[in-house]
Image: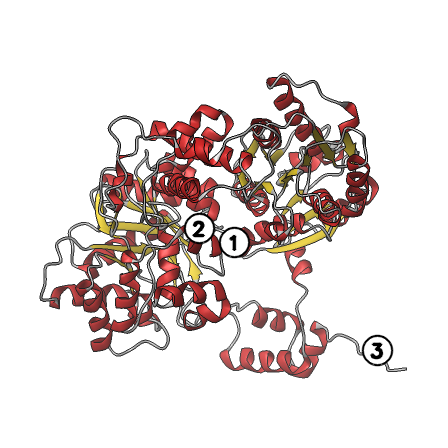
Amino acid sequence: MSRKIQRPTLKDVAREAGVSIKTVSRALNDEPRISPETRRRVLEIVAALGFRPNVLARHMRAGGRDRAVALVIPDLGNPFFGLVAAGVESVLRHHGLTLLVGSSDEEPERERLLVTTFLDRQVAALLIVPCAAAAHGYLRAERQRGLPVVFVDRPPVRLTADCVVSANFDGTRDAVAQLVAGGHRRIAFVGDKPVTLYTRQERFRGYRAALDEAGIRPDPALVVHAHLDVDSAAITRELLARPDPPTAIFAANNLVCMGVVTALSRAHRRDIAVIGFDDFILADAFEPAITVVAQAASGLGSTAADLAMTRMQGDRTRARTVTLPTSLIRLRRAARAGAGLTSASISAASWPAGWNPGSGNASWCNRIPSSWSSRIRACANAAHAMTPDLGRDAGEALGDAVALARCLASESTVDAGLRSYDRSAVAAIPLGRESGAVPGPCFPGGCPMHERRIGDVRVSAIGLGAMQVSLEGRPDEAHGIATVHAALDAGITLIDTADAYHIHPDEVGHNESLVAKALATYSGDTDAVLVATKGGHLRPGDGSWRLNGSPEYLKLACEASLKRLGVPAIGLYQFHRPDPAVPYAESIGALRDLLDEGKIRMAGISNASPAQIRQAREILGGRLASVQNEFSPDVRASERELALCAELGIAFLPWSPFGGAHRAGRLGTAHPAFDRVARRHGVSPQRVCLAWMLAKAPVVIPIPGASRPETIRDSAAAADLTLTAEDLAEL
């Protein structure tokens, strides 16, 4: 049997280095009271011995908490809770925090044991998806001591605390109402267990409400319960064997839905309509095809983490509950029962008086009144649900409805229509478009499709992220300037920079200076060019990124940027990244002061959460012009920030849209769908990626990086690429 190797201790390092334990500690903590030679010798011995400091003990000795946040979930094997954890982690990594996860297995005793274990670790915050039978009064004292405690997906029992849940009632009511609109009267509810589970109760309330609104008397025999897919498959077989089986089934969660559809598929029953609560992987691969009520699982986690971060930064306001909306997706040939829309009835629909989309001009989508949005979207949903085999004319009509919805200024208005549609909404389906292409995104007010807005300034739909011409691996200055000139030649009028885009500590603002020089030496007109810069990040020269969000520093940084750019006022100045050491309100207050003083014309934020977006907008008095977050095919965690920006009319600037400089060239390999679409259009996967982002919302303005002229020319051409509905569905 091999002998156990002991982990080296601080005492071992001190003995080998011939110094005191305190000296070793100073070297590890980079304290100034130690000579460079001693520090070097200590660190070499640390590396040789493989010594690792006890971070938890260090925090506890300092009287602080661990740099970790705990998450308790009911089931590690359920993909839904994996997405919740991913959402939490996406926020924590921006704050330098680690996520610890434990599973309660839906057992109250196990849940409390896990919570106690995490509390003993002095975690920085506690997030809990509670068990059905658990009570949480024992956490009251922890909350009073200032520990952020946030409940996710289900509210706490016997405790007032922050909570993030989905719109379980509304989502279920709308889904069952859609089945009713399809002619179904015998609709089964296959719910989760136990019946006391909060999500099960809310979804059952939505089911009953939809039936009550339709005047349908519920049949208790159609209300059944299961927990796993195996259980729900067996129950589905029992439902089908009844003398009066259901014509439609509502499955109350992802695992239950998988079992329901598996049973239907094996029984070759394509006549039963199915809607499930929760999207899941390969949901669209099942036969018969299904519709799902999609809830933002990762959004639940990220919103909960945002709440925890706000509390950690000193927010002591009353506990609040955040409810995230749901949406109906994957509407593919759902079955109908009896009467429903027919291809003929859809093709007979006409435009409202005075409207004609058949001109072939993509800008016609700008003229659609927002009051029609809910009817257009609702009509597409209703027709999909009620008509199993649409003809060519009806299929084109539905394509137009989707195209219209994508072009409308307010997606929230469109989604709201799902809750109130009726069959008369078919009159809103437009006909007459010959192409299956989705019109390019348009801005309200008639901006051409290659332009967008930041505040009241029109800019190109694609910007230039100038960072790559100043960081590691940068080209020489002449090539860097040539890249900026190529962007201007291609029609780009938004250039993104920052004072922290440099390599060496003695060249702060290298990128700003290069951009200023490129604009000064450009032979064309640069009056319409908006330069956006940022402050709040520092690079000490060792490859790391540090933070300083203090108002004093931000104001000094802005003054320095003004001088480097050579302008009387910065067009767009953005707070680069939240600094955990400084209250967010104080950092944003500095931007407000700079606006009021006229030193910046517009203010923006970067790497922000939804809570921070709302907070910044309030502090700035509604003058928040932009949000710059990471977003790419690899990193889609900012979907919720994008949606919020679309709702509020704030420009959303995705940085690293290709996944970073080192991954950009492999985008098509890493994401084959982008490569397939690119080959169909005869363009690069990178161009497809940017066009996909533009189709997300009219507030999106990607800022791809480039260090070569040919790269930014290809990116700029994405504004002219129109993706079809088929392309977007594949991506």
What's the distance in space between the residues labelled 2 and 1, CA to CA? 8 Å
Q: Position of residue 464 (x, y in %)?
A: 28, 61
Residue 402 or residue 243, whichever sits in front: 243
Which picture quadrant has residue 433? Answer: top left
Residue 426 or residue 177, whichever sits in front: 426
Disc 3 on helix, strand or loop? loop
Residue situated furthest front in the rendering = 344
Residue situated furthest top in the rendering = 215
Which residue type carries mark 2? Pro
Which residue type carries mark 1? His
Which residue type carries mark 3? Lys
In contact (CB < 8 Å): disc 2 and disc 1: yes
Disc 1 on helix, strand or loop? helix
Q: Is residue 553 visible?
A: yes
Disc 2 on helix, strand or loop? loop
What residue do we see at 80% from left, 30% from top?
243
Q: Which residue is mark 2?
A: 578
Near mark 3 (Cα within 10 A), the count class, few <14, some 14-19 or many ≥20, is: few
Q: Is residue 484 left or right of residue 220?
A: left
Residue 189 or residue 411, whichever sits in front: 189
Q: Is residue 573 left or right of residue 308?
A: left
Q: Earlier in the sequence, mark 2 or mark 1?
A: 1
What's the distance in space between the residues labelled 2 and 3, CA to CA? 44 Å
Q: Which residue is mark 3?
A: 4
Q: Is residue 134 visible?
A: no
Q: Earlier in the sequence, mark 2 or mark 3?
A: 3
